[in-house]
Each structure stands twice: as structure tokens, then as C-alpha cells.
Amino acid sequence: MCYYNGQKVTHDEYIRLKQLEKLVANYDFLSRDLQIGFDYNQNTVLKANAEKTDFDLVQMEWGFIPSYLRTREDVFKMRSGYKDASGKYRPPIITLNAVCEEILAPGKIYREAALKRRCLVLSTGFFEWRHIYPLNKRTGLPLKTANKYPYYISLKDKGYFFMAGIWQPWTDKTTGEYVETFAIVTTKANKLMEQVHNSKKRMPTILNEDLAYEWMFGDLDESRISEIAATQVPVEEMQACTIAKDFREVLEPAKEFIYEDVPALELNL
């Protein structure tokens, strides 16, 4: 899944993105090489205005909060796991990503947002883990435990791109705190991402400009929502490289790092 995202664009790209110089005052929130989903921080999202005639660049909390949760304590329990009144452990529910095949299913927490509150998540590149099973030196068979290597994935010749998202307003019923939260929509991995994210074989739904506009502004029926949500960006438009395993702690998390024992990706797909 997509739990790490980059949101660092140049000054010129920022101007082109919004075409409103007055917003450059907020440029500081577009200078983050790495956004870690499990920190549940604010991320930059493109959100249509009420009339659907324009969009705003806004900050939303990454991690969709269902409307039935009443307080921040409830949110913390959902995200961290907890023991209920009977002592039974309830595992965490992760809402950073929304699986495209399920977002419109009856009873799903994402359904209303997919129908009414679609947004775009700005990205300059995202991070995933590749699992490689070393061979047993005696038997020649793969070991049961994989070595994990991080990759940085971006689009060729594009400083930024758009991921399909859905958003949800949420108010703490006790404190009155109001936030807008979002999840990134994911789809089945294409041939490149099948090699990189080879454990779950998923990838974020990346949209070109036309589909991004339709996703955010279009009056879409369920069939078209599902169709766009399942979009796979063409392999030839993507690029991927290995990065340092401590990428979450270094100054340049997207910097290429070569591992001698990692097989090269098959790029001629």
C-alpha cells in the first residue's frame, strides 16, 4: 500500500500548479521530501470548491476518520488498537488507503465520500518496499523470511502528479475540533509495481490531467467512479530506484542507493 509520499515541488512548479501567486505565502507546506502516513500529519490536497468551478490547495489529515467516531480518543484507538470492555484485543484499522474495488460497496465507510467528496493528493513520488527471498545455500530453495528493500517511485519528466483521493469532514463531539481527512485510492499494481510492491501488488491510483479533472469535478455515476479509481498509469511513464533502508531518517530520502544483491527490475514490459 502507499503509506509514504513526497510533496516537494519547486517554486515555479507551484506557481503553475495553482496559477495564483498569492498562495506562495503557503509554499512552506510543499517542501516535504517525505510524508509518513502513520504520523497522521497534514498533507497537501486539491479540493474542489462548493460550486465545483475551481479548486483550492488545502491541508488535510492523512488518515480517513469515519463519521461514527466521536472523539480523538476513539480515533486513537482505531488507529492503534485497543482492548475492549471484555478484554479482547481489537487490532488497528488503517484508513490511509482506500481499495478501489471496495470504495463503493454498501456499508463501507468510504462510499459516501467516493460519491460526493473526491479529491486529488499531490505527489512528487512515493515509497514502497520490495520483498526478496534469499536462497538457502544448502537446498537452493527460497528462505521463508524475505529481505525488504525500499524504492522511490515517480513519473518521468514530471515534477508532480496527482493521486486519486477521497475526503471526509470530521468533528470531535467533545472538543469541537474540526478537521478534514483523506485516504489515497489504490488500484492493482501494473507490471512495474508488481515487481516493486511484490507482497500486496497494489499501487496508488495515479491520474493524468484529464482524469484528475474528471475525478474532482465530474458528475460521475458509480460505474465511472469505479473505472477511474481502477486506473493504472502506464509502465513506460514510471521510474523506480532503490533507496537507503534508513530513508525515513536521512536528509534526502529519495536519493538512489545501490544494493549489489538486489536483482534489477525488468523494465521492458
Image: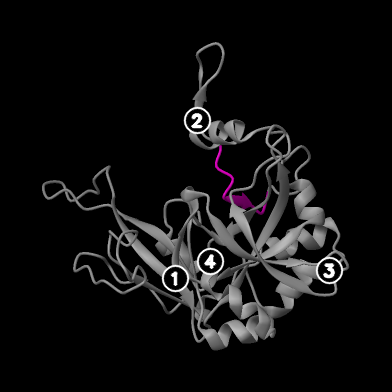
Residue 81 badge: 2
Residue density around tag 3, few if under 14, some if 14–19, many if 20 or more, within 10 Å: some
The residue positioned 50% from the left and 25% from the top of the image is 82
Q: Is residue 153 above or below residue 42?
A: below
Q: Could you give the CA–CA distance between mark 2 and mark 3, rounded to whole angstroms?
A: 37 Å
Comes first in the chain, label 3 or label 1? 1
The residue positioned 42% from the left and 51% from the top of the image is 199
Q: Are marks 4 and 3 in contact (CB under 8 Å)?
A: no
Residue type, label 3: Gly
Residue type, label 2: Gly
Instruction: Judge left or right: residue 123 versus residue 254.
Output: right
| Res 176 → quadrant | top right
x, y percent for residue 35: 47, 60
Q: Nearer the viewer, mark 1 or mark 4?
A: 1
First to last magenta residue range: 93-101
Q: Nearer the viewer, mark 4 or mark 3?
A: 3
Question: Is residue 242 located in the magenta-colored stretch of the structure?
Answer: no
Question: Which secondary structure lies at badge 4?
Answer: loop
Main secondary structure along the magenta-highlighted residues: loop
Question: Which secondary structure lies at badge 3?
Answer: loop
Q: Quickly name the residue at label 4.
A: 190
Question: Which secondary structure lies at badge 1?
Answer: strand
Q: Could you give the CA–CA distance between mark 3 and mark 1, rounded to whole angstroms?
A: 28 Å
Q: Is residue 64 above or below residue 56?
A: above
| Res 20 → quadrant | bottom right
Comes first in the chain, label 4 or label 2? 2
Q: Quickly name the residue at label 3.
A: 218
Question: Is residue 99 located in the magenta-colored stretch of the structure?
Answer: yes
- The front one of 15 and 262 is 15
Q: Quickly name the residue at label 1.
A: 153
